[in-house]
Each structure stands twice: as C-alpha cells, then as structure tokens.
Amino acid sequence: MAKIGVFVCWCGSNIAETVDVKRAAETIAKIPGVVYSVDYKYMCSDPGQDMVKNAIKEYNLTGVVVASCSPRMHEKTFRKAASEAGLNPYMLEMANIREHCSWVHDNKEEATQKAIDLIRMMVEKVKRNKPLQNIKIPVTKKALVIGGGVTGIQAALDIAAGGIPVILLEREPSIGGHMSMLDETFPTLDCSQCILTPKMVEVAQNPLVTIMTYSELEKLEGFIGNFKATIKKKARHVNVEECTGCGTCWTKCPTKVTSEFEQGLGIRKAIYIPFPQAIPSRPVIDEANCMKFTQNRCGICAKICPKQCISYDDKEEFIEIEVGSIVVATGYDLMPTSAFGEYGYGKYPDVVTSLQFERMVCASGPTLGDLQRPSDKKKPKTVVFIQCVGSRDPEHHKAYCSKICCMYTAKQTMLYRHKVHDGNAYVFYIDIRSNGKNYEEFLRRAQEENKAQYIRGRVSMVYQDGPDLVVEGADTLTNSQVRIRADLVVLATAMVSPIGVKELAQKLGIGYDQHGFLTEAHPKLRPVESATAGIFLAGCAISPRDIPDSVSEASGAAAKVLGMLSKDELEKEGVVAIVRECSCTGCQNCIRVCPFTAIALKDIRDKAGNLIRQVANVNPGLCTGCGTCTPTCPSRSIDLQGFTDEEIFAEINAMAELH
Amino acid sequence: MKEIIEKAKELLSQGTVDLVIGYEQCGDKQCRPLFVQKPEEADKLVFNEFCVHNLATYLTRPEVKQTKRVAIVAKGCDIRAIVNLIIENQSTREHVYIIGMNCPGVVSGKAPNPTKPHTKCQTCKVRTPQMSDVTLGPTPPESIPMDKTITHPDVEELKKKTREEKWAFWREQLSKCIRCYACRQACPMCYCNRCIVDLNTPQWIDTRSNLRGNLDWNIVRAYHLSGRCIDCGECERVCPANIPLMLLNRTLQEEVKEKFDFESGYDLEACPPLTVFEKDDHENFIR
Amino acid sequence: MEEKWEPTIIAFVCNWCTYAGADLAGTSRFKYAPNVRIIKTPCTGRIDPMFILSALERGADGVIVSGCHPNDCHYNEGNFNARRKYIMFRALLTQLGVDLDRVTFAWCSASEGIKFAGLVTEVTDRIRKMGPYTEFKQLNQDAR
C-alpha cells in the first residue's frame, strides 16, 4: 500500500500569494494513499529538507511529492534528500506549482484549484513509480583524437598531460594540418612553423601519445566509455620503424607530382614527405602516381634504400582499438575555386587563393620566400585582395562568414609590403570583422603603417589585359566604379567542411549541419560536446575559427575528456527503456526508431541452443531515455522507466476523477 | 488444379518443405484452409475464386514457425503480407516457399453465398504474383500499374460527410462491435503474442463491449495497421457484426500513400513508414 | 447554484523545449489561462497518440501536444518520429469524425515562453467557445 507524503511549498510569497497552500495541503491529504501532507515556507531550505527526510522515516513513506518550483530548479536537491533518508530518489516527484501556476495566474481560486490538480496528478504518478537505480558504465581510460592539425595536437597534448593515453589519428602522411602551411600568423606575426613545430615534436615525443598518420576511422561501435574503433592504416609502402628519413629515395625518385602541401605551386616526388618538418619524417608512396603501381616499372627507391625499407606489396591494415572518449578535430578545407569563374581562377595563373599566397611568401615555400607571381616570376607591384569569396553569399555559395579572412587578408597585405616596400595592396571587402584581442589594432597597422588600401565593395569581374589583370569592382562608399590594373589577385575563399566529414559523422553517429560542419550539443552551453555522449568537438570542424579559438576549444574538449575519464565508472540516470521479453515479438519497430542505436535484437535459445525467437534488448549505456521506442511498440513490450505508460496513464486518469 | 497438387507432393516428398498450407473446397461456393503434411493428403488442394483467405496469417503461428520450412499457396495480395512479415522479422524468405497463384480475382460477401467480385481485386497490382518460388495458374488479366494511385469510392464518399455525420456513422457502426476479436485473429499483420487490448497495466482500452471500448479498440487496431495493412480485407470478411473495417484501413493507406509515398508489402527492403521519417514531412497542422 | 463551465486542457509536452518554455513563461510572469494541466514527458517521441485519446475520453475538452522545433530535438529525432505518428493519427481521427479542432499541435522552444503563454490562452478561448466535448463525455458516461 502506497504511503505518500506531500510537501507544499510557499516559496515565501512566490507561491503562497497566489495559491492557498494550506487548502491545497488539506485537500491533498484526503486522497487515498496520502498519509502526510503539509505546507511550509521554504521547502528547499535545510529545515524544509529535514521535514521531508523526517517524514520519510517517521511515516515509512513509499513516495514523496514536493509541490514547489520547477523540477529544473530543485529536483536534484529533493531527490538527494530523499535518498539520504533511505527512499529511492526516483520515488520523489515534483509538482510545479510556481513556474507553471502561481507565477502565471492571478486569480487565487483558479490557481489554487490548478495547484491541487497538479499535485494530485503527481501523487497518482508517484504511487505507480518504481524504484530505479542509476546505471554504472565501466570506462576505458584511453582517448582518440581524430585530426592531427593544431587543434588535434593540442587536444592530444592536454589529454596526455592528464595522464590518459591518446591516439592521434591523421589521414594525411604527416600531422600539422593547415597551420603548417601558413607563413606568419595574425595578430603577432609569429612564424607559423616556428610555433607549431615544437608542438608537433612535443606530441611526437610524448610517451602517452600514439600518432597514427595516413590512417582513417573505418568503423565505430560501442558507446560512451566503451568505444571500439576500427582504424584503417593505408598502405605506406615504407617501413616506418626501420626508415631513418635519410631522403635518398625521394631525391632519386624520377616521378614529379604537383605538391598538395605547396598548394600546387611546387612539386614533390611520388615517394615523398609532404614538408621538411613532417612528423613522422618518413616518406610515403603515392600509389596513384608511382610508376611501380601505374606501369609496374622503375622500382628505384627499393633498390637504393640503404635499409631496404620499401615494400611495394604493403596492404592497408585494419586495427581495432578501444577508447573511452573521442575528440573530433577534422578542420576545414577551402572552397574549391572552380566555383569562381568571374574571378578567373584557373584561367589566369596570377589569380591565386590566400593559401597559395601563404606559400608564395613563406620562407619554406617553393620560392623560398621570394615573392614571384606564377605566370612570369615577376615581383608583383600591385596586388588586389578580394575578401568574402564564397562566404556571405547565400544566393550563390555559403551564407556564413568564414571569420578569419578579414584578419589574414590584413596580415597578407603586411607580408606583401614587407616583401615589396613600394607595392600597392588593395583590399575589396564587404565589412571588416576584427573582433579579437589586438585584432583591430593589427588591422589599423595594415591600413596605416603598411598603406593597404581598403575598398568597400564587391568585385564584379577579373580579366587579363596583356600581362596585367584588370579588376573591376564597385566602391560602395563613394558610389563609383573602380578599375585596378593588378599583377596578382588573391582570393580569400570560404572555409568549408573537408571532404569525407559527413561520412565520418555518420560513422560516429554525431550530427552535422547543411554545410557539413559538426553540430554541438548546445551552441552556447555545450560548445565542445556532440549530442552523442563521449564524443567531443573542437576547432574548424564545428565552423570557421582562427588558431586561438581552435586551440582553446581543443583544451576545452580535452578537459571534458579528462573529466569523463577521471572516474572508474560513469553514472547515468536510471531513466532508460526496458523490454518485456515475454510479449516482445522482435518486430524491430523500436530498433528502427531509436535515435541512439541503443536497441538490438537478442536471441532466445532453448537449452539445446536452438534459436526459439528474437526479442529487443536495450543497452542501458546507450539509451538516453527519450522514450521514442515506447509508443512505437504495438504490444507495449518496451516501456520507459520513470515515464511508464502506467505512470502517465495515472496522471491522465487523475484528471478524470475531477471532471 | 493438378499443378498445385503435383507441386505440393513434390515439395513434401522431396523434403523441401514439411508443411504445405493451401485451400480445400468445402461446399459449392466455399473454400477453407488446408494443412498438408504428407504427400497423399495433397489431393484435396484447390485454387479458385473462393480461395479468399489470406493464409499468410498462419505463418506466425507457433506450430508453423516450428516447421523446418513451409510452403504456402499465395495470391499476389497475400504475398504482400508475407513481405511485411519478413520485414518485421516474423518470418524469413528462406523459411517460406511461396507457391504464387496467378489470380483473376476472388469473391466477396459472406459464405456460403458470396456474390460479387472483391473490391480489392478491381484495383489489384499483383494479379501475377511477385517474389514467388513458383508461379502457377493461367495468365491473369493485366494488373493495375504499380505507380498508379488508387482511391476507393467508399473512402471518397465517407470523406465527403461532415464531421458530425462521420461521427454518427461510426457511432452506429462501432456500437455493433461485440469484441470477438475475429478481425485480429484473421489479420496476417496482427501477430502480437499479447495484444495491447489484453494489457491491464495500464488498461488503455476498456475490454467491455461499450462504445468507448469499441472505439478505442478499433482506433488502436487501425492505427497499428497504418502503413502495414495490405488490403486483404480479411478483417471485414470475418467480422460477424458487418462493420466496414476496411473503410478505416483504406483511408489510412491512402494517407500513407499521399503523405509518405509508400505502399506496404511490395518491397522487402522498405521500413514500416511509422518507424522512419523525412525531415520535411508534412507539418502544416503544427503551429 | 450553476457553476460557469470552464474547459479542461491537458498539455503533453517534452521536457527539454516546451516544459522549459513553460518555465520561462513563469519566470517572465507571462499570464495565461489557468485551464491547462501539463504532463511532462522526456520527448515528443514519447507522447503516444493513445495519450491524446485517453485524455479526451477521460474528461479533457482540449489537448495540446508540444515539443522542440524540427532539428532542435534533444534526442535528435524524437520529434520527427512523433510528427509522423500524429500525421497518421490525425487522418484516422478525421475519418472517424473526432473533433480535431480540440487537439492542437505546436512546436515551442525553451526560449518561447511568450509563445507558450499565448498558445494556452488561445486554445482555452477557442475550446471555451466550442463548449464541453460532450460527444466524448457521453462515451465516458456510457462506460460507467
């Protein structure tokens, strides 16, 4: 027999002014099963909580209803109190008579009647509540970071600093990402390599970090604390253990290939390291271009390798790893420039992207920092920078702002003027966004000290006229047409999500938006978490960011990982689905609707091992308690604990008694 | 009908199956299901326009599930039920040997004096059965094209009524329900071990034969069949109270076709439409 | 003494959006009609069409079903699944002649306290004009 205690809170005058709390408590006391019903000024105060605890003990209460504020405010408080008094915390419910009643109604009679109804509904529910246990999940104390750019590197370092082993996964032959391609960085003009390389070395030398380059996630199974990842190690054809990175192979390799790292402005070999500071500094054979693979000839590298490290027969390998948590830091790509016919990219060699410009001015670039325009190696005397190429253009391309272009364009005008002191740098812009620490000051330096000339307006077209490029655009401030003869045009192309991210997100079971950027669990309050427990996000994988933001997010995600993996077991609420196996037909409706793949078929076998039938089976570690499965089951063989059919039906029925 | 008999004998004697479910004659204008376990029992098998039963309903019976493999005499429409049973994990393609029957149509109306051709046969898209292991019988008239949207005149007529008229109509019809659950027993898609109507914690549905209980029961059954009903009409045929149950079912199947562009029982790879969604599903009723 | 009839409205809401939106209406002190009784579920995906039917049969004159906007579901997909169920359930009730003007579906986010308050008042006013749902109350009487 239920023994329910009801505690009606005044919340000072917040409730008591509009609800006749005394009458409510007295009326509720008459409901069968209610053995104790009182009102008190502040239930959440220590004396208030003590009233609950004492009553639980004194009256052997089997259930409690606290009628006060929203459960969002104090459900935890009161459930903890109940628990301390020996009552299962899930046997306590709250009737929300403040936010949902006293604060939104004026008429005391009506509000009191409503409060009584709300309490009565909760009394009927709590009578049918069942004690639930929180679910404990064991944790694998190991993390996986996907993406070896500066974000991934930082995340791996921070996780390792907390004593947790990390696997850093990178699909390219080297870690380093886009930052390794940059020349100098805003707003301090640090040399990008100079600040990144030490971090790359640090992460390579950290005993807790395992770097897996030229590798991709093939499959992910499991759930928070217990993921099982299958990693595809692409065939490198070089024995990384034995190789010393001496460089004989790539020096002698006869096949020249356009270098991805140099953004097409330089060349590499078919066996190559992407850049001198690469980690690991071990080459990889590019099967698509190596003659051994395309024509079955050559084979020079294998012949001359002093340590016989080359093996053309290497096959891709699949490695299974178990991790407790994952950080996704897959970065960005630039929008394919084929999209911008009006700017002549691809048609005119002297129209380049901003990332190409970085390589053109970089001391480690193909010209060793000697700025030459691609067509005739001439030093450009006039450079036009065009911002928002593909960004902020909802009609044709991306509606969003790529966020970093204003600042790096300002930086590039400075880098340019440092190389060409009398050169003219023009910037076409829509708005200038310089809202970071020292960013506005930096921009002013570009404009005032380095004489970058900013023109507010869009460029309508770029065309070749003799050796020059002609840029035609509008100056919307003076309302005039502008025509500039330029030697070089630099496009600040939009940042987009890299190829393959959607497929990766689907493997991970995390959300992404229409642009392919990964979706945060909450854009403000949970910015580095995905909606899938145990998987965290950082950097440009979420949306365009600059280096400081990406690195901070990496540390944020690492802190989340460490917080999670600091415990031996994770605890989650007991509100999970449960299957009544006796009546389940195994029709798979619940399996099909479950957003978290928390339900699977389970075989029921007889003693001889013969399959008798199949039923649904809930993995409580994966179940988030949404209850979408329950109404989908025709025979009601799956129910959501904490919100069972019986409990909700009781709430509905509580109304029937009144009307 | 020699070919059915021969096929059944062959399947049983060669041990391909250990049970054949088919039809036997039981009166001039009436057939009934026949369960054949031995080759010599197969001589009674027939197929004609009185073979109205949807035998797929037996596939989910424990005795049939326990067989090593079962052969079933099935019209194109009955195969739609088999498809759904496979999709819903109640059977497997390997377990069922489908003796598909070319079918010009069956009769409607109550035995022993069925009169008119069945409504469902006029709109049949599978007179030549799909997916069968063997197809028997003379070539039937051409089927209605698969992509054609079918609207039933009786559904259209009901739709024309005002809300009050509809309510009055169904009040009258559902008042007749005696809660015998024959509809549930005959329906190949009603295979639960324990029906929701038999659940008492909570008791969603009043088990007494009053209008509230009758309404709830028929709402729940129709709702559970939405996107799953294969228009075999067995529920309506077996209803002793003559409630036009197919009127409800057809309404829902037309809605599924209109809103989700889906017809059940034709595609083994499909998911029941209420277990999936499209992000741009119709929602002009939501504010 | 004849009491003036007031409609009873039951609102089934999800925990993350509409329940929180109703909380926000409270903290913002947006006044609305006192006729609504809220039943909390984790997600619209949990809100079974049977809840709606039972509520109407057991004395509600109007029902509100509300949860997160599309793409905002805390569980990613619950509201999408729910929407399909309601589409079919509405088609069924329409054909049976059940008064669907008494059942209101709305998306209402945690930040839409004002929408929630307006919704409740609007629905209450509408149902008040329609009068008690006697057709279903009669069913209930008959069943006693």
Image: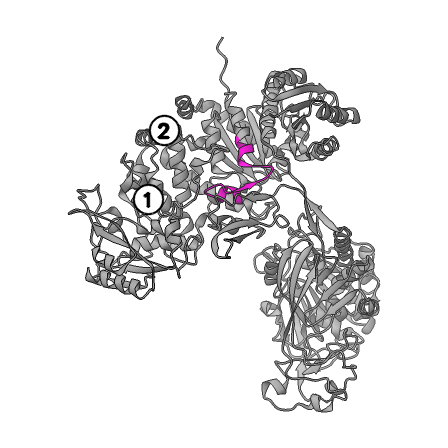
Above or below A177: residue A443: above
Specify the segment rendered in magenta.
A629-649
* Residue A473 visible in the shown view: no
* Residue A632 lies within the magenta run: yes
Position of residue B241 measured from the top left corner of the image (x, y, whole percent): 28, 34
Residue at image position (15%, 47%) is B28
Between the C-alphas of marks 2 and 1, the distance is: 20 Å
N-terminal of the pair, mark 2 or mark 1, is 1
> Quick one: quadrant of the N terminus of chain B?
bottom left
Relative image position of residue A632 (x, y in whole percent): 49, 44
Q: Which of these two is toward me, A338 or A275?
A: A275
Q: Amino acid type of disc 1?
A: Ala
Q: Which residue is mark 2?
A: B209
Q: Is residue B202 positioned above or below A546 on the image?
A: above
Depth check, front residue: A460 or B113:
B113
Left or right, residue C63 beside residue A94: left
